[in-house]
Image (cartoon, rainbow, N blue to C red):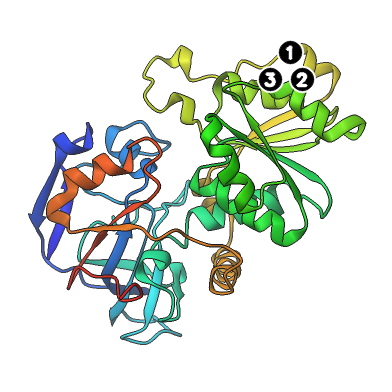
């Protein structure tokens, strides 16, 4: 089989090689998956650079998030599944937890407790993105912050994939959103998605606008994917007792200086207004959640996507041979579409 392998840590286009490897054999409780499509997330590329929360043992097959495919074979004690079933593989390594196979290969073995069956009407492009960003959005809004109908939710990076999903989910749940973007030309798009209010940091003051929008009651719950000074402003903008959950650090993605990888919080605001700032990382969530709870949450996400409550934009397919082009697109500013590797006929059966 073909596999896209990083020979060492480094810039993805420098260290990735297309290799031929033997097809693996499923062991007890595992399934062999014939991969059809697998996305290229920015976090996948940071793993290869050695700048993520975990590091695989190199050489390593790339792709440490998710894919869609069909079950080609089952190992012993793999109950409840059938050969030929179409499944999403939640290939996010649990922390702490054992290593898992990379998804940028034609076949992989996966724990059957990490497999979610998906209907054929859901395109490969959508299905292969089901287990990471939609799940993150659901967990942030519900289990992490328990935002209630009618409450305000403040979020940064509203135009990101997770940000858009948070808007859609909040609208479905009756939650009001204040959405922070960097560019003025993004404001109308966010409003068209259902965002109640939009703050553009290009020409607006975040603290003043939050106060104007929320009034005396204020905002007590926020999610931040930027960190840096913007993340600090989000904390400062919250009402006393407010909480911000940080799940990304977009402002630091090209930084290597540890001093730049910060959120410069104001101590007086945190202490005297008893605000909380804490992190969320899907890998640690998988490390703490039981397999049953993880599958239950994934099933809920599947239902939201299948019912079109959550909309996953169609990705752009690439064969493995064009990995340099796909990686470049994955990190292009405002690219608007997520690249994904496709196998077999190179098409997306749900898009034809």
Task: Report the residue marked by disc 1.
Answer: 267
Tag 1, which secondary structure?
Answer: helix
**In the rendered structure, are the residues bearing label 2 and label 1 in contact, judged by CB atoms less than 8 Å apart?**
yes
Task: Report the residue marked by disc 3.
Answer: 205
Indicate the position of residue 148 as horizontal and vertical percent values. Answer: 81, 53
Tag 2, which secondary structure?
Answer: helix
What's the CA distance linking mark 2 and mark 1? Answer: 5 Å
Sort mark 1 into few (<14), some (14-19) or many (20+) by Cα contacts within 10 Å: few
Q: Is residue 129 above or below residue 26?
A: above
Q: Residue at x 34, y 44 (%)?
A: 44
Q: Residue furthest left?
A: 20
Which is closer to the viewer, label 2 or label 3?
Answer: 3
Left or right of 34 on screen, residue 173:
right
What's the CA distance linking mark 3 and mark 1? Answer: 20 Å
Indicate the position of residue 189 as horizontal and vertical percent values. Answer: 56, 46
Do we see residue 270 in this rendering?
A: yes
Task: Report the residue marked by disc 2.
Answer: 270
């Amino acid at each position: 089989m073909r596999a896209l392998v990083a020979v060492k840590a480094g810039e993805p286009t420098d260290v990735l090689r297309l290799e031929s490897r033997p097809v693996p054999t499923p062991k007890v409780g595992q399934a062999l998956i014939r991969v059809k499509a697998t996305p290229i997330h920015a976090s996948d590329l940071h793993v290869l650079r050695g700048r993520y929360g975990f590091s695989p043992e190199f050489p390593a097959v790339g792709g440490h998030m998710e894919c869609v495919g069909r079950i080609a074979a089952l190992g012993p004690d793999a109950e409840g599944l059938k050969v030929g079933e179409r499944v999403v593989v939640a290939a996010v390594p649990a922390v702490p937890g054992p290593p898992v196979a990379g998804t940028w290969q034609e076949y992989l073995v996966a724990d059957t407790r990490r497999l979610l069956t998906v209907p054929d009407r859901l395109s490969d492009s959508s299905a292969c993105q089901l287990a990471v960003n939609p799940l993150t959005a659901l967990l942030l809004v519900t289990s992490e912050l328990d935002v209630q109908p009618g409450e305000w939710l403040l979020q940064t990076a509203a135009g990101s994939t997770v940000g858009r999903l948070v808007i859609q989910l909040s609208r479905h749940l009756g939650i009001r959103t204040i959405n922070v973007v960097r560019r003025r030309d993004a404001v109308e798009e966010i409003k068209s998605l259902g965002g109640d209010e939009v703050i553009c940091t290009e020409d607006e003051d975040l603290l003043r606008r939050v106060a104007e929008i929320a009034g005396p009651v204020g905002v007590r719950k926020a999610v931040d994917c930027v960190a840096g000074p913007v993340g600090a402003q989000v904390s400062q903008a919250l009402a006393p007792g407010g909480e911000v959950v940080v799940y990304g650090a977009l402002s630091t993605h090209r930084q290597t200086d540890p001093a730049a990888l910060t959120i410069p919080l104001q101590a007086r605001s945190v202490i005297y207004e008893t605000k909380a700032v804490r992190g969320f990382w899907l890998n640690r969530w998988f490390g703490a959640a039981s397999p049953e709870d993880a599958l239950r949450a994934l099933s809920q996400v599947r239902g939201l996507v299948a019912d079109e409550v959550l909309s996953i934009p169609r990705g752009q397919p690439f064969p493995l041979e064009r990995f340099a082009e796909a990686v470049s697109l994955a990190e292009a500013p405002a690219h608007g579409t997520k690249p994904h590797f496709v196998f077999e006929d190179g098409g997306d059966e749900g898009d034809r």
